[in-house]
Image: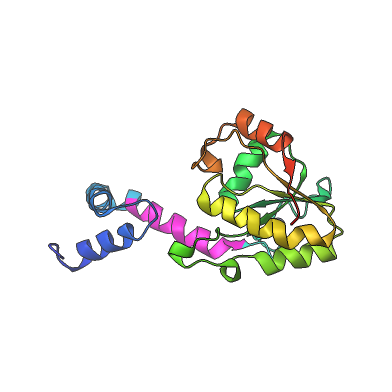
Amino acid sequence: MSVYAGPVQDLIDELGRLPGVGPKSAQRIAFHLLKLPKEDALRLARAIGEAKDRVTFCPRCFNIAEGDECSICTDTRRDATVICVVEESRDIVAVEKTGEYHGRYHVLQGAISPIEGIGPDQLKVKELLARVDAEGVQEVILCTNPNIEGEATAMYLGRLLKPLGLRVTRIASGLPVGGDLEYADELTLGRALEGRRDVEGD
Ligand SMILES: [Zn+2]
């Protein structure tokens, strides 16, 4: 139902494609942008353009990066023998805030979700296995979200990694179940990391 004329409806449609933005919010944001002085609205458009031009994904860990590898992969003080596996780049921010972790990361860029048709092939799983082999990794911490998709992903990776003879751990429960890592406070997430448990091999 397009009530609005061309460009207004186009704007609403584009905004409505963003995660967590329903039709009503899309409409509200669109009208907010229309009311703004042109310069303010264009600043947003430019910020999107700049980010798309300059930000890429790290070819090693798939974190966001400017240039080639990300700032964590290129930091020689980080422990390269431990990899913390997360779903999205924003989860790295959550783990970094705990100050408890000094290894490297691997961003899957999603989680297994049969409902959304996302299987291991759509995630950076092959790339993780290649790193474990090539980088002398001794421990992989499965730090996916404590919800159905995150648990399924952790279980899947546990089964793949365990036979490779390295330590595979899962962050401890205690995080709000069904929630996202990014909403956990530093203290809780820090404790969950510290209390991580070895994944059972089967
Ligand atoms: Zn990286």
The stretch of residues the image draws in magenta is 41-56
Residue at x 77% of width, y 54% of height: 74
Nearer to me, 123 or 88 = 123
Nearer to me, 189 or 101 = 189
Residue 132: x and y in percent read: 80, 61
Residue 88 in sight here = no
Residue at the far bottom: name it.
121
Nearer to me, 3 or 163 = 163
Residue 94 is a magenta residue: no
Residue at x 65% of width, y 47% of height: 143
Nearer to me, 81 or 51 = 81
Residue 53 in sight here = yes
95 with respect to 11 (left or right):
right
Residue 53 is a magenta residue: yes
* Relative vertical location of residue 133 with respect to residue 73 in this rendering, above or below: below
Look at the magenta stretch and give its main secondary structure.
helix
Residue 192: x and y in percent read: 66, 35
